[in-house]
Amino acid sequence: MVPFASLIAALEGIPDPRRRQGRRYPLAHLLLFSVLAVLAGATSYRGIRVFIGVHRERLNAPFGSRFRRAPAVNTFRSLFQALEPADLEAAFRRHARALGEAAPASGPRVIALDGKTLKRSFDHLNDAAAAHVLSAFAGEAALILAHQEVRAAPEEVPAAQALIGELGVRGALFTADALHCQKNLRERRPRRQRPARAACRSVGRGIATEAEPALRVLGGDRGQPSAGPSSASSASRLRAALTRSHPLSFDQQGSIGFKSGE
């Protein structure tokens, strides 16, 4: 019997995005060997190629493949960039569901929902943050039933509800962390973010209100600067009051600006 026969069958159902002239290596074996390479510690296309090159004969014998050499790095790059992530996820979900149904159950099924940020998944070149993935883990079978990528942790709540419906599991107990312990999730509307101009106007009004007493000291009721020895000390007090109330900075010429990073 071929090892991972059910997984290979699931991978064979993925549409091949390559041209017919470029299908030198079977898609299912390329994906399977890439998975094994990643499990062995490969973190790049070159690492996958090195793994297949070192273990090529050991991989050909049990899996029935006929790799004469390891595929080129461009083969893996072109393949993974052209693959549809939804098709790959659907294939793994079908395989995991079949394994989960075949696993013996000593009690009620328990599926844990939890989100984690993937280590080293950030992309500095394209200014992309690390990927955050919500997973459904079947404890009795020790299987990941599904993955769902979300933009941040707060988005786990609606993603978890959608994931439960997509799994189609009945008679199972789902567990989650305290993030999901919220009332009336369906009735709650997302908060509307105030426009940037409105926020700036609000900050400006607050600055003007708090600076009014100090401005009176500087220029009297008419707002004109008064000449005298107290003008410099009053200006210093104005700067100190504004700095305590708002994240502002003053340069040597007296210009006012928001401090960066606050």
Image (spheres, grey):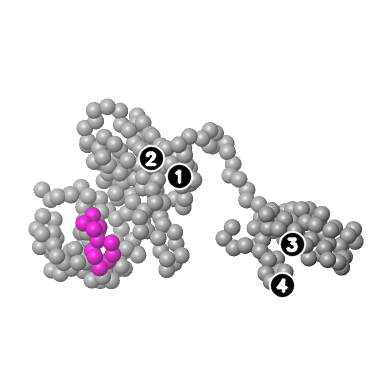
> Which of the 4 quarters of the picture holds residue 163?
top left
SS state under label 4: loop
Q: Three-letter amino acid code at disc 1?
A: Glu
Q: Earlier in the sequence, mark 2 or mark 1?
A: 2
> Which of the 4 quarters of the picture holds residue 254?
bottom right
SS state under label 1: helix
Q: Position of residue 198 (x, y in %)?
A: 70, 55
| Drawn side of residue 212 relative to residue 87, left or right | right
Give the number of the disc on residue 113: 2
Q: Three-letter amino acid code at disc 2?
A: Leu
Q: Earlier in the sequence, mark 4 or mark 1?
A: 1
Q: Earlier in the sequence, mark 2 or mark 4?
A: 2
State if disc 1 and disc 2 touch (CB < 8 Å).
yes
- Total numbered circles: 4
Q: Earlier in the sequence, mark 1 or mark 3?
A: 1
- Residue 133 shown in magenta: no
- The residue wearing badge 4 is 253
Q: What segment carries the magenta color?
A: 38-48
Give the number of the disc on residue 236: 3
SS state under label 3: helix
Closer to the camera in the image, 211 or 76: 211
- The residue wearing badge 1 is 156
Q: Earlier in the sequence, mark 4 or mark 3?
A: 3
Q: Residue at x 44, y 50 (%)?
A: 150
Q: Position of residue 138 (x, y in %)?
A: 30, 38
Q: Residue at x 36, y 45 (%)?
A: 135
